[in-house]
Amino acid sequence: MAMQYAPIVLFVYNRPHHLRQIVDSLSKNSLAGESELFIFSDGPKDKETQENVTKVRGYIKTITGFKSITIIERERNLGLAESVIAGVTEIIAKYGRIIALEDDLIVAPYFLQFMNDSLSVYQDEEKVISICGYMYPLRGKYQDTLFFRVADCWGWATWKRGWDLFVASGEELYNTLKDRKLLIKFNLEGAFNYTKMLKRQIQGRNDSWAVRWYASALLSGKLSLYPRKTLVMNIGFDGSGRHGGVNDYFRTEILNEPIAVNGIPVLEDERAIIEISSYLKKQRFNISHGNVK
């Protein structure tokens, strides 16, 4: 019986140049031709965004190289968070697993292989909530995969059992984190102010679904699997995105070779936490204007 690969869900809006880059990199994956692709195109926010949304919608109708392509065009502008939450919920309910991407990423040639292998290896491991494709530029020597508490959003995958744990209410998440005295852990012991990000989401000052996804994972006591070296690059920090700003803090060289997924014990890698935390502290990243996720 042929293996059923997870559907790919791509969320797009008004950046045709970025979109072409992710589709190009994704189509170079050997499993692209065996994978179903669902493209959710958010509607224009105003007259200024209409032109690029129209360009995006024209381009996505020309995409080839996948097992099948389904395009869902939203009539109104949902915004990033609502678009992602609704799209993931819809597709995962039908397929039970999903690989999710946004339009400001570039993926490695073995990205889909890593995601599908990991989804299969850990499908019955309740402590694993997601698979993540991005990895910070670590200098230490690590095994091919490692576990980390943050459920990231730059090229990720999960199962229905994982997505069922998502809590949409930022206020509920914040209060529970506070009551359970988990805010310090949530902030990686002071390395990154996820609490501020979550508060801004509650206040309507950012549109982050991802900080709520991470909070949901932490409160559920779950971990996410990461590759030792990144399989994803975010190209959205050029001022074009909703939350990105302009910086290159998170740019790192993509790994162009396969990652072995061998089913390691589900324990957070303490060395990696220390190194990632140190890296984030050194960046002195200012999130006062929104969310990097």
Image: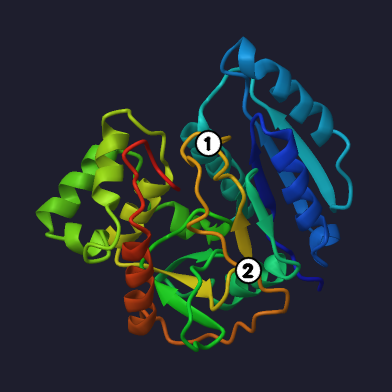
The amino acid beneath tag 2 is: Glu
User: Height in image: 105 above or below 45?
Assistant: below
Q: Residue at x 85, y 33 (%)?
A: 61
Query: Could you say where residue 245 lies in the image, as x and y percent from the top left?
Result: 48, 40
Query: Could you say where residue 222 lies in the image, as x and y percent from the top left?
Result: 35, 67
> Residue at the top extreme?
47
The amino acid beneath tag 1 is: Ala
Judged left or right of residue 81, residue 262 is right
* Colour theme: rainbow
Residue closest to the eye, 253 or 144 = 253
Q: Residue at x 22, y 66 (%)?
A: 189
Looking at the rendering, which quadrant does residue 171 occupy? top left
Query: Could you say where residue 49 lies in the image, as x and y percent from the top left?
Result: 63, 19
- The quadrant of the rendering that contains the N terminus is bottom right
Q: In the rendered image, which residue does mark 2 sit on? A: 253
Q: In the rendered image, which residue does mark 1 sit on? A: 86
